[in-house]
Image (cartoon, rainbow, N blue to C red):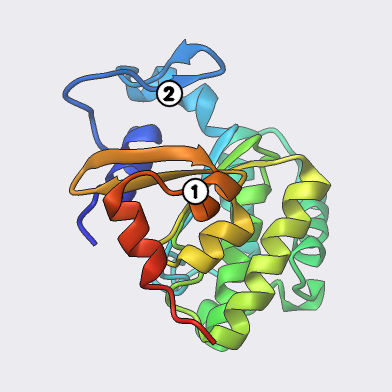
């Protein structure tokens, strides 16, 4: 907590402005873009938030929530095309298309997160920031959502920036891991190297704190 994980995520999507350094996406610097210039990158960079229910508008039904990015970026799409896209992506995340007119309060936490995932996928992005997407879910539901994210990554050829404080999940999800402490990068390496041959004392302490069965 307080190491700067979510701050990095918000800086990448330009919610927060950085005071120094650069953010590069496909070799283009995006850290100092204004809202209009940033707009073309928003289709390729999406985000899944930590609290699934809080990230959904309670006054909008599922269809409206998932279709909002599509309508915003492609206003000329007709209603039928938008609805078909929404139903397709709902099926991809394990939601029933006939739930399209229901509201967030009618779903469980895990289902709400699936709605959030569907919303992030509707624009067919290349890069998704997952900001602790399972930390507020029950352990049994966490596994379902993690496995869903892995399946979607393979299906849609996605790159994830997966933020988590759970080292077991980090090991399961990541090819590369960056370890942060008080806003500083203390170690960065391949996932297997981090867990099998940690170099920094802080990383060693984190790994030693993982509960053993």
Q: Residue at x 49, y 48 (%)?
A: 197
Say few, some or many: other residues with alpha carbon within 10 Å of mark 2 (under 14 / 14 to 19 / 20 or more): some
Closer to viewer: mark 2 or mark 1: 1
Residue 28 on image: x %, y % = 48, 12
In the rendered structure, which disc, 2 or 1, sits on the residue that comes first in sequence?
Answer: 2
Q: Which residue corresponds to the image point at 66% horizontal and 49% vertical from the top-left?
A: 121
- Residue indicated by mark 1: 197
Answer above or below: position of 60 versus 176.
below
The picture places residue 74, in percent across and down from the top left corner, at: 65, 34
Badge 2 marks a residue whose secondary structure is helix
Q: Pointer 1: residues within 10 angstroms few (<14), some, or many (20+)?
A: few
Near-viewer residue (103 or 92) = 92
Q: Which of the labelled discs sits on residue 166, or is there none?
A: none
**Marks 2 and 1, how far apart in space?**
39 Å
Could you tell me residue 83's position as x and y percent?
77, 56
Q: Is residue 108 visible?
A: no
Q: Nearer the viewer, residue 78 or 162?
A: 162
Q: Nearer the viewer, residue 192 or 141?
A: 192
Q: Which residue is mark 2?
A: 38
Which percent across, then down, holds residue 199?
Answer: 38, 44
Q: Quadrant of the N terminus?
A: bottom left
């Amino acid at each position: 907590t307080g190491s700067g994980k979510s701050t990095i995520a918000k800086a990448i999507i330009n919610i927060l402005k950085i005071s120094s350094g650069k953010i590069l996406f496909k070799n283009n610097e995006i850290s100092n873009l204004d809202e209009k210039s940033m707009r073309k990158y928003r289709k390729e960079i999406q985000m899944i938030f930590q609290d699934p229910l809080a990230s959904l508008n309670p006054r909008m039904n599922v269809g409206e929530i998932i279709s909002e990015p599509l309508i915003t970026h492609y206003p000329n799409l007709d209603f039928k095309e938008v609805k078909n896209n929404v139903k397709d992506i709902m099926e991809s995340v394990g939601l029933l298309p006939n739930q399209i007119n229901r509201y967030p309060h009618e779903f469980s936490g895990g289902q709400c997160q699936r709605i959030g995932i569907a919303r992030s996928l509707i624009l067919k992005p290349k890069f998704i920031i997952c900001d602790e997407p399972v930390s507020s879910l029950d352990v049994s539901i966490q596994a379902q959502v993690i496995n869903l994210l892995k399946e979607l990554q393979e299906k849609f050829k996605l790159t994830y920036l997966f933020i988590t404080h759970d080292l077991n999940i980090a090991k399961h999800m990541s090819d590369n891991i960056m370890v942060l402490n008080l806003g500083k990068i203390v170690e960065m390496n391949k996932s297997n190297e981090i867990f099998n041959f940690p170099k920094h004392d802080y990383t060693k302490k984190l790994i030693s704190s993982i509960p053993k069965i």
